[in-house]
């Protein structure tokens, strides 16, 4: 169990990135959903021991690790949002270097483990190419390979699917699911589908504050029988955004499809009841969180 | 090209640099150079003493020298780095794709960037000029010899435009182009390293300006040195003459402008190619290519059976180091450092020169020590750039978030980089060592040995590199700024250089050991071993503290407290070592305590005792017991004092290191009053006995270097030129045992195997167990005493012997033959040599000098034994002849302290050497030596304060070169004027009188004796009035030359003018293939004299004074190649 209590982070400025966030994260996959700039990466960096909090407490398996990141690192796998590699090393050499730094061991030796990990992330063909010749997606996969190495007890992945094509994304989902069976996997993302696919529980964070901790089902259930969808003109879409709780507007074949949540008032004419998705629920929660 | 876009880029570039530590660091350095350094001190003329004519601090020449040296020292690095990292900074910020996806062309981009760079640097130059103008015109005068002349804005603008701006443009342009081309910081760092090294090396060369200076003289410093300041032109010239440029420097300045502009233009072309992806350049994205079908995921991660174990610190360090080493291998620019270092080593070794520009025989240790500044300079720069780039690489490549979240201890990230750095600098040292060994191998003389390089570069220098690297890391960790770290590190290097150049360095501060080590093949670090160990321990302790600070402050977790205040506790160890070392230095023989002793001695005794005649010693009887391992001596002796001349009080001077002193007078023990080293006896007696012991030298040196008195296992040198050996009679403003000769018997006990030679002849030697006692007795009275000891081989000649280190045989035969010849010829020319033996003894190079003690000449290993044999300039023979001449001109003829006395010592010794060289080695060798004396005199004289020979004293440093060099050359001219027989007769009469009458000889007395034998006393008087009573130095010019065929011969006509003062009779020769024709011309000052020749063959060259008989300025301009005949 990873317990986060009243975590605050104030940067010089002052800029408050976290306003007293508290979370209880059990073993398994846990999602952290929020828009860009909401404080997700700040929270991830604090948990990874790369940033000290202004105040608050972090307890992991009954051990206070708030100011002792060296107790976290031996059991941590971390994939940051923004990272790079030494450009002149090959992918295999870079991965092996990081495995050594992490103290990872395997019966067949590190070289063999490196090959197998690269195979897991579909980089075998580029193992001996220099990293500076990798595409963005290849670098992301290399990052994933180092994060999952060594059986970490806590795996933090921050925007892990950025740059991955749909096939690779599915491959990665499978890896993460396997890992989440017996460890804490904390997935930070602004892509709702990632949470929908992987996380039995997730938290929503906005402007450095925790909006809610819920499950996908419970979040969708919140909007059951309250979510309506209709096709309107652009002008009407803009007007409805002012008068109703519009969750989102999208263009479909040139037409504005609006989804909105109704409360006591009836829905606008022409709108029909729709099955809420997690995206609807997330957008409703963040809007509600802003209103709160 | 769109000017508006160029302006936008330039403006942004300027804004960037206005926040750059490089720019503000440069401003601070320039401000320091302006405020703290007196430009007048850079004018090699004038005098700081009272009545001296002083140079203006604000003259155009003072400013030119100041600006060009400021450019070299401060602008070279910072301007290069600021410009060179400009494009790389954009790459690291990853703005390339954004910028180059606009209409901005590569040319506009490059032009704008460079304009922005030059705007920033130009602003610094403008600020520099304003600071200089404000400070030197309105501020307080810095330094005792500062004097402000009339204000002229051109005095500032002209040097700035001529010296600084082209240099800034050159450094910036070349670095900018290198940075754009290679896109790696290390390539940029190599540029100023090479530029600085090459410039300093060329500045140290005494060769006249040549075409090779056109691309190398970046700041105009060498042009100033070799054209303007090589000969002192007098204060009036420097204060008021305009700065006139010649064709060579105009070409040089043009190159300094055109080359960087061409380099930047080439950068624009290359950048165009990089931007369009036609060549490798920026770190950009690449495509996946055509990947094969993805392999299906088979099995689970559990199948990999991965586990983790906390990596040990050793494994972590090694893993980080391995990664760094692999990075190093991919940076070819690093190899530029190595190549430059080995080139510099080869050039430094090959261009090393000794006295009179003689070649040097390097032994392994001597070469290793002489190259310490080179290897540490390059090594420290290399380590600086490697350390900073390596430690910041994770952040720059954005790997830091992953890497710092691993369980590797923070110390491993630091130490791993340092292990890689150690391997890098090891590679550098091995490369330099290989080149040095190759040099030793190729030397005709000398030998090869590896152990001195391992000892010095591997062992002794290791703490230097350690403390440097750790300190750089600590600064980087504390400042968290790569560029600020560079600025601070460069500032430390410059301050270190300044401390060395100003003589302010001590063992406590001398972290790179610059100027601290002297090598002698006769014993390794016997003199300075203890302070060296303390210094190395101090540097290691400081390095450890710096490492701890670096680890504590390391930016691994953002916002984490750094706890570096704890460093105060860790700093106790180096502080304690520094304090102990300071105490030891202060108490040592070069420390303030010793200086205070001298001041105290003078203050307490000068007024009362300076005019009291000292006791006159007639005989010295002494026992000296030596223990070289402890530097210990025990002396028990007695002086017989002359009756009839006993002063009312008897006093003797003993140095501060003398202890446990006991006196007896006529057999009765007495308590002497010790007045700060002047021991005043309570009674008068005929026989004064003394006993005491001493450590010689006592304590640590201040910053390495040497000493002229020592008792060491490898050698002994004690003498009565100071009060550290035997008591000196009376109050001594200058040292000696008295102007009256005395006899001596001395018994010296030393460990067997250490031969100790004294004055006189050896009459007995007795060996008791492990000690030997040698008795020395004077066979003719002497005025000075010494002891010289060593573990020698011995080479005998006819009544002469050379005692030398067995490993230094190369010049011994030349010394033996010169000793024999000098003894014979000087006896013939001056006075019969009165003693039986004449010995020359090699001593360890703790002092680079030779001294003409009677019968027993001490001769440093560094002054002739390790000189490369050169038949054209046989330096060992020259120095031997000079010191042998002192047997006559110092020991037999001992002048008093009146003006002109030094001419009778050093001037006559040099003159005697000229005579001997002419006789034994031929005219060509004598001419080479004479030219050397002339060059030394011209570069050492100070026109406005030079005194005539009659008025020179030993109190003034500028009088030394006048007495010794001008004195010798003037004597030679008198010799030529009088003729050999008359001159020799005059000298014999003078020496005989000095020996027999006991009246202190004077220069006027010598000239009087010579005049009495001159065939034409009137012309003799004219010569004396011109050359001895005045400071005349003629200067000849050849103009209006024509060569016309005249039947079977050639008619040559020329106008020779003495553009200097005086009337001079001089030979003028025309020479051609196999023929030469000579005439003698009398040249009055400023009067053109027409001279003609008829020569049989085609004439090629005209030379004024071809045989170097006449002292003159600018000798090279008094000879010309003749034009083709009309």
Image: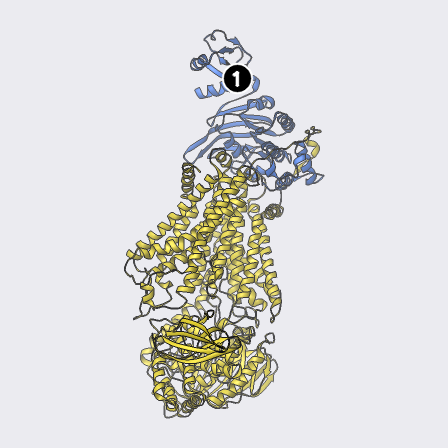
Chain colours: A blue, B yellow
- Residue B416 percent location from the top left of the image: 58, 48
The furthest residue to the front: B1047
Chain of the residue where label 1 is placed in the rendered structure: A
Residue at mark 1:
A280
Determine whether A15 is above or below B774 in the image: above
Residue B16 in sight: yes
Q: Residues within 10 Å of mark 1 (few under 14, many from 20)?
A: many
Identify which residue, B319 or B836, lies in the foreground.
B836
B447 vs B1011: above or below: above
Query: Based on the displayed image, in which of its 4 quarters is residue B954 positioned?
Result: bottom left
Q: Quadrant of residue B18?
A: top left
Report whether residue B1000 is seen.
Answer: no
Image spot of residue B404 (x, y percent)? 55, 40
Left or right placement of residue A187 versus residue B129 in this view: right
Query: With respect to residue B419, does A230 lie above or below?
Result: above
Compared to residue B832, the image places residue B99 above or below, namely above
Whether residue A258 sits left or right of residue B594 in the image: it is right
- Say what secondary structure mark 1 lies in: helix
């Amino acid at each position: 169990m990873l317990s986060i209590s009243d975590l605050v982070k104030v940067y010089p400025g002052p800029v408050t990135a976290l306003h007293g966030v508290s979370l209880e994260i059990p073993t398994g996959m846990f999602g952290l959903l929020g828009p860009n700039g909401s404080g997700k990466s700040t929270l991830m960096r604090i948990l990874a021991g790369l940033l000290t909090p202004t105040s608050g407490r972090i307890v992991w398996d009954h051990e206070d690790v708030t100011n002792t990141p060296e107790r976290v690192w031996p059991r941590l796998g971390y994939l940051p949002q923004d990272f790079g590699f030494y450009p002149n090393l090959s992918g295999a050499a870079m991965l092996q270097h990081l495995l050594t730094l992490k103290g990872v061991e395997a019966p067949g030796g590190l070289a063999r483990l490196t090959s197998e990990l690269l195979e897991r992330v579909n980089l075998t063909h580029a193992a001996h190419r220099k990293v500076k010749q990798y595409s963005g997606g290849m670098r992301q996969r290399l990052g994933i390979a180092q994060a999952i190495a060594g059986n970490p007890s806590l795996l933090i992945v921050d925007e892990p699917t950025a740059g991955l094509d749909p096939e690779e994304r599915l491959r990665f989902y499978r890896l993460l699911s396997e890992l989440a069976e017996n460890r804490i996997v904390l997935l930070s993302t602004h892509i709702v589908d990632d949470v929908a696919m992987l996380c039995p529980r997730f938290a929503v964070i906005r402007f450095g504050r925790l909006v809610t901790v819920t499950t996908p089902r419970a979040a969708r259930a919140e909007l059951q029988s309250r979510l309506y969808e209709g096709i309107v003109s652009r002008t009407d879409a803009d007007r409805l955004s002012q008068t109703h709780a519009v969750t989102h507007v999208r263009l479909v074949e040139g037409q504005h499809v609006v989804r909105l949540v109704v409360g006591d008032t009836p829905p606008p004419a022409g709108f029909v009841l729709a099955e809420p998705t997690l995206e609807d629920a997330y957008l409703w929660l963040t809007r509600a969180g802003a209103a709160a | 090209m769109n000017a508006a876009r160029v302006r936008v880029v330039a403006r942004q570039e300027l804004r960037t640099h206005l926040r750059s530590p490089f720019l503000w660091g440069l401003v601070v350095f320039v401000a320091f150079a302006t405020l703290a350094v007196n430009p007048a001190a850079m004018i090699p003329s004038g005098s700081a003493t009272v009545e001296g004519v002083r140079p203006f601090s604000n003259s155009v020449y003072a400013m030119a020298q100041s600006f060009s040296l400021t450019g070299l020292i401060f602008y070279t690095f910072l301007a290069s780095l600021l410009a060179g990292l400009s494009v790389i900074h954009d790459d690291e910020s990853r703005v390339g794709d954004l910028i180059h996806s606009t209409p901005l062309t590569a040319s506009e981009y490059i032009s704008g960037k460079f304009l922005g760079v030059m705007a920033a640097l130009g602003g610094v130059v403008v600020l520099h000029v304003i600071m200089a103008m404000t400070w030197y015109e309105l501020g307080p005068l810095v330094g005792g010899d500062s004097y402000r002349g009339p204000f002229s804005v051109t005095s500032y603008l002209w040097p700035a435009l001529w010296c600084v701006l082209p240099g800034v443009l050159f450094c910036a342009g070349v670095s900018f182009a290198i940075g754009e081309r290679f896109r790696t910081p290390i390539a940029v760092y190599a540029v100023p390293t090479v530029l600085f090294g090459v410039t300093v090396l060329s500045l140290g060369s005494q060769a006249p300006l040549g075409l090779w200076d056109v691309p190398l003289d970046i700041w105009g410093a060498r042009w100033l040195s070799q054209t303007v300041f090589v000969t002192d032109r007098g204060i009036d010239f420097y204060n008021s003459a305009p700065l006139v440029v010649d064709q060579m420097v105009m070409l040089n300045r043009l190159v300094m402008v055109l080359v960087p502009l061409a380099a930047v233009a080439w950068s624009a072309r290359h950048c165009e190619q990089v931007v369009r992806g036609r060549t490798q350049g920026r770190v950009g994205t690449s495509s996946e290519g055509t990947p094969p079908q993805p392999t299906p995921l088979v099995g689970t991660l559990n199948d990999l059976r991965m586990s983790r174990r906390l990596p040990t610190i050793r494994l972590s360090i090694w893993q980080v180091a391995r990664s760094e080493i692999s990075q190093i291998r991919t940076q070819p620019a690093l190899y530029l450092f190595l190549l430059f270092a080995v080139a510099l080593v080869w050039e430094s070794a090959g261009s090393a020169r000794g006295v009179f520009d003689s070649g040097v025989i390097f032994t392994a240790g001597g070469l290793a020590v002489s190259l310490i500044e080179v290897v540490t300079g390059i090594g420290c720069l290399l380590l600086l750039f490697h350390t900073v780039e390596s430690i910041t690489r994770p952040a720059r490549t954005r790997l830091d978030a992953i890497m710092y979240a691993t369980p590797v201890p923070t110390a491993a990230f630091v130490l791993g980089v340092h292990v890689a750095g150690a391997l890098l600098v090891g590679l550098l040292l091995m490369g330099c060592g290989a080149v040095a060994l190759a040099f030793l191998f190729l030397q005709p003389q000398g030998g090869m040995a590896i152990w001195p390089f391992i000892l010095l570069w591997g062992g002794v220098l290791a703490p230097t590199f350690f403390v440097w690297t750790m300190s750089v890391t600590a600064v980087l960790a504390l400042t968290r700024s790569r560029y600020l770290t560079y600025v601070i590190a460069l500032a430390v290097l410059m301050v270190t250089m300044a401390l060395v150049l100003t003589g302010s360095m001590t063992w406590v501060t001398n972290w790179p050991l610059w100027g601290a080590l002297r090598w002698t093949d006769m014993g390794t670090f016997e003199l300075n071993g203890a302070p060296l160990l303390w210094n190395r321990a101090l540097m290691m302790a400081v390095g450890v503290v710096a490492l701890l600070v670096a680890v504590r402050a390391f930016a691994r977790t953002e916002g984490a407290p750094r706890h570096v205040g704890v460093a105060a506790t860790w700093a106790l160890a180096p502080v304690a070592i520094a304090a102990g070392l300071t105490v030891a230095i202060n108490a040592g023989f070069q420390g303030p305590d010793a200086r205070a002793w001298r001041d105290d001695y003078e203050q307490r005794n000068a007024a009362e005792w300076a005019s009291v005649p000292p006791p006159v010693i007639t005989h010295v009887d002494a026992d000296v017991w030596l223990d070289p391992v402890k530097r210990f001596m025990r002396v028990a002796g007695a002086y017989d004092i002359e009756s009839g001349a006993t002063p009312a009080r008897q006093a003797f001077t003993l140095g501060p290191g003398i202890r446990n002193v006991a006196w007896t007078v006529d057999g009765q023990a007495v308590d002497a009053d010790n007045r700060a080293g002047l021991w005043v006896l309570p009674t008068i007696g005929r026989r004064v006995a003394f006993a005491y012991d001493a450590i010689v030298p006592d304590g640590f040196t201040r910053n390495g270097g040497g000493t002229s008195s020592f008792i060491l296992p490898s050698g002994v040198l004690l003498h009565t030129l100071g009060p550290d050996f035997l008591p000196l009679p009376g109050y001594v403003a200058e040292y000696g045992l008295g102007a009256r000769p005395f006899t001596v018997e001395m018994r010296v006990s030393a460990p067997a195997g250490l031969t100790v030679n004294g004055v006189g002849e050896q009459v007995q030697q007795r060996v008791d167990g492990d000690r030997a006692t040698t008795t020395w007795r004077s066979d003719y009275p002497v005025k000075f005493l010494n002891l010289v000891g060593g573990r020698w081989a011995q080479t005998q000649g006819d009544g002469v012997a050379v005692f030398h280190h067995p490993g230094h045989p190369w010049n011994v035969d030349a010394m033996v033959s010169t000793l024999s010849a000098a003894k014979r010829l000087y006896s013939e020319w001056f006075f019969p040599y009165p003693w039986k033996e004449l010995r020359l003894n090699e001593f360890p190079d703790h002092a680079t000098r030779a001294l003409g003690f009677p019968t027993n000449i001490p001769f440093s290993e560094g002054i002739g034994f390790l000189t490369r044999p050169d038949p054209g300039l046989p330096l060992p023979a020259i120095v031997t002849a000079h010191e042998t001449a002192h047997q006559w001109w110092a020991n037999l003829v001992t002048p008093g302290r009146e003006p002109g006395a030094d001419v009778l010592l050093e001037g006559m010794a040099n003159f005697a050497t000229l005579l001997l060289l002419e006789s034994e080695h031929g005219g060509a060798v004598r001419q080479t030596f004479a030219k050397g004396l002339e060059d030394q005199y011209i570069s050492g004289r100070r026109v406005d304060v030079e005194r005539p020979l009659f008025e020179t004293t030993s109190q003034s440093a500028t009088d030394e070169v006048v007495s010794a060099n001008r004195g010798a050359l003037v004597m030679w001219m008198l010799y030529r004027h009088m003729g050999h027989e008359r001159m020799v007769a005059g000298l014999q009469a003078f020496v005989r009188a000095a020996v027999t009458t006991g009246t202190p000889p004077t220069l006027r007395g010598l000239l009087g004796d010579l005049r009495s034998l001159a065939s034409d006393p009137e012309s003799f008087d004219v010569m004396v009035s011109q050359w001895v009573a005045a400071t005349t130095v003629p200067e000849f010019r050849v103009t209006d030359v024509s060569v016309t065929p005249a039947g079977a011969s050639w008619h040559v006509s020329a106008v020779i003018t003495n553009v200097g003062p005086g009337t001079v009779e001089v030979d003028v020769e025309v020479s051609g293939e196999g023929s030469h024709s000579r005439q003698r011309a009398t040249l009055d000052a400023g009067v053109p004299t027409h001279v003609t020749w008829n020569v049989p063959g085609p004439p090629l060259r005209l030379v004024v004074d071809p045989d170097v008989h006449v002292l003159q300025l600018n000798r090279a301009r008094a000879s010309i190649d003749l034009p083709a005949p009309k």
